[in-house]
Amino acid sequence: MEDDSKIIKEMEAILRKKAEELYSEKVVEHGTNPKNYGAIDSPDGYAKEQDECGRDAEMFLRVKNGRVVESKFKARGCMFTVAACDAAAEMSKGKTVPECFKISQSSILEHLGGLPADHIHCVLFAAIIFQRALKSYITKNKK
């Protein structure tokens, strides 16, 4: 059992090194070690989406005094989808709600240092779900 664990760790290290040769360090870090993965109980803002590729994701926001204090997500998809959702969550922390509306496909892409052209749609997916969670917060607070 111990040997299996050692082999798995070695294989993960090899795969990570290969990925870092192909993609930016931020893409690999957000995609393989997302710091904002999880859920928030009774979130202030929430959205859930599924796209035609079979990816699905949820975005959870906690807002205090008009600022995002916690942002989490759950996603099922490729490393690029996870990276984009994690980046959107990270970028929102500490920002005011109006500042968060600037978190878009292009700003997430810039934050990640780019993605392969055939995965740009993953960033759009993350931007859409993040913006919908933000809008759900605004809708909730208009009441």
Image: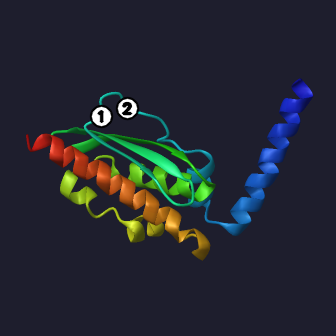
Measuring from the top left, give residue 63's x and y in whole percent.
23, 40
Q: Is residue 30 left or right of residue 11?
A: left
The quadrant of the picture occupied by the C terminus is top left
Relative to 60, residue 112 above or below: below
Q: Is residue 114 left or right of residue 99?
A: right
Amino acid type at image mark 2: Ile
Q: Residue furthest top?
A: 1
Q: Is residue 62 left or right of residue 8?
A: left
Cβ atoms under marks 2 and 1 closer than 8 Å: yes
**Residue drawn at the location 54% of the way across and 45% of the way down:** 34
Measuring from the top left, give residue 30's x and y in whole percent.
55, 52
Residue under numbered circle 2:
40
> What is the quadrant of residue 22 in the picture?
bottom right
**Which disc is residue 43 wearing?**
1
| Label 2 element class | loop
Amino acid type at image mark 1: Pro
**Residue drawn at the location 54% of the way across and 56% of the way down:** 81
**Residue drawn at the location 83% of the way across and 38% of the way down:** 8
In front of the other: 93 or 76: 76
Residue 66 seen anywhere in this rendered image of the structure: no
In front of the other: 52 or 76: 52
